[in-house]
Amino acid sequence: MFRKKTKSLVALSLLLSALIVVSGCGNKPAPTTTPSATDSKEPIKIGFLGAKTGDVAIYGLNTLKGLNMAIAELNKDGVLGRQVQLVEEDNAGQKDQAINITNKLISQDKVVAIIGDPTTGITRVAGSIANTKKTVIISAGATGTNVVEIGPYVFRDTLLDTIAAPATMKYVIQEKNWKNVALITSKNNDYSVSLSKIFSDAIVANGGKVAIEEFIQDKDTDFSGQITKIKAANPDVIVFSGYYTEGALIMKKAREVGIKAVMVGGDGLQGDDLMKIGGDAVEGSISYAGFSPEQPTPNTEKFINAYKAKYNNELPDLFAAQGYDALMLVAKAIKDAKSAEPEKFKDTLAATKNYDGVSGTISFQASREPIKTPVYLLEVKGGKFALLKKVPIEMK
């Protein structure tokens, strides 16, 4: 009985061996891994984070126009053989909505990068989420402090306040001889609070003096108390670190009480509503920007002409130009890294040097902070922003 059982086991073993050999000569087993994101032919999804409605909608809408210009150009040939798809959302300038949208763009829409928000405060909260979830985010407008420090997935292609504000104050104090400064800060605006500190330090460094400092809040409309105190201080210039709506209303009140000093500020004043609301009261106002359509380079001129053709002869502003550059920088990084995976192309993006953007020449430092040149000083002239002066910045 034992011998018969042994023979049966041997025969069964031989039969199984033969079956294994035969199966090895047939079709190969299906692979257990799925194609990588690099091999996919699905569209490369890019998220837009910005306001299309609300008080700062002008920033988001113009950024979106620049993004659509870039999308159309990139999709002529594609990126890594794939089309680029923009996923749009509207945060209405609200942080809580920006948080929800950022999470949605990453977790549901599966974007590989987010362009936006144009404002510093929202960029900080969105940047924290994107960095944690290892998705590249690049702001085409945030200029305040403590942005890229959030982490290695957070970028911006803007003219930094820490570079532009000192250059502006040097011009105001040393060339215009406006030394006594009235400084106005919007207390509930992260951008304004950080910019006022930079302006204050630059005023002192260039031989000026903050004769009086007053505070407002975004959405305030009555500035009678602050302007009455400012008039008594008799400043040579009013430096306001906030946005265009409040800036326009401040200057209307200033002109009503007979103050002749002009307003100087950052790129937060860059919006046509400054002139629409402020009218003659904002004539002569000076602000800095990372872009001007005047005196363009050949690359910038090409962009301007295409923009005018697409948008009914409208000239692009800095948000449109920086939005365009932001997406083009991301696309170049994806191409150079040969991968649309954020963990791979973020390092290629960080290594960008002397990129010839339509908003200026852009290089990222080791900290990922951009150095842009030149600084454009713009003056409100005849109800429009006009180039006052180009201030070159040394690229390091």
Image (spheres, rainbow, N blue to C red):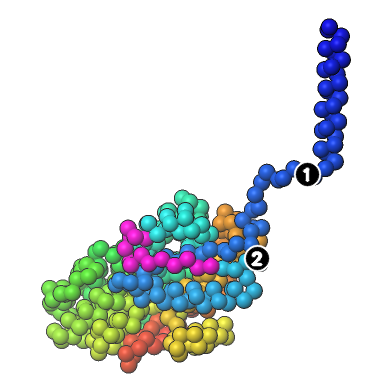
Q: Which kind of residue does numbered mark 2 sit on?
A: Leu
Q: Which kind of residue does numbered mark 1 sit on?
A: Lys
Q: Nearer the viewer, residue 30 or 204?
A: 30
Image quadrant assignment for residue 161: bottom left
Say if mark 2 contacts mark 1, CB within 8 Å: no
Give coordinates of residue 307: x percent, y percent. 49, 84
Q: Which residue is depicted at the point 40% across and 62% down?
A: 123
**169 falls in the magenta region:** no
The first of marks 2 and 1 along the sequence is 1
Quarter the N terminus occupies: top right
Image quadrant assignment for residue 217: bottom left
Quarter the C terminus occupies: bottom right
Crowd class of label 2 (few under 14; some 14 to 19; many from 20; radius 10 Å): some
- Tell me the element at label 2: loop
Query: Badge 1 is on which residue?
Result: 28
- Tell me the element at label 1: loop
Give coordinates of residue 223: x percent, y percent. 16, 75
Residue 1 at least partly seen: yes
Q: Which residue is depicted at the point 36% across and 76% down?
A: 58
Describe residue 120's horizontal placement relative to residue 348 as left or right.
left
Image quadrant assignment for residue 272: bottom left
Q: Nearer the viewer, residue 35 or 370?
A: 35
- Give the answer, above or below, for where 304 lies relative to 7: below
Q: Which residue is depicted at the point 52% across and 69% down?
A: 327
Q: Separation of disc 2 and disc 1 at Cα?
A: 29 Å
Describe residue 118's horizontal placement relative to residue 280 as left or right.
right
How many numbered markers are drawn? Answer: 2
Query: Badge 2 is on which residue?
Result: 80
Give coordinates of residue 83: x percent, y percent. 60, 68
- Give the answer, above or below, for where 289 lies relative to 125: below
Q: Which residues are magenta?
A: 85-98
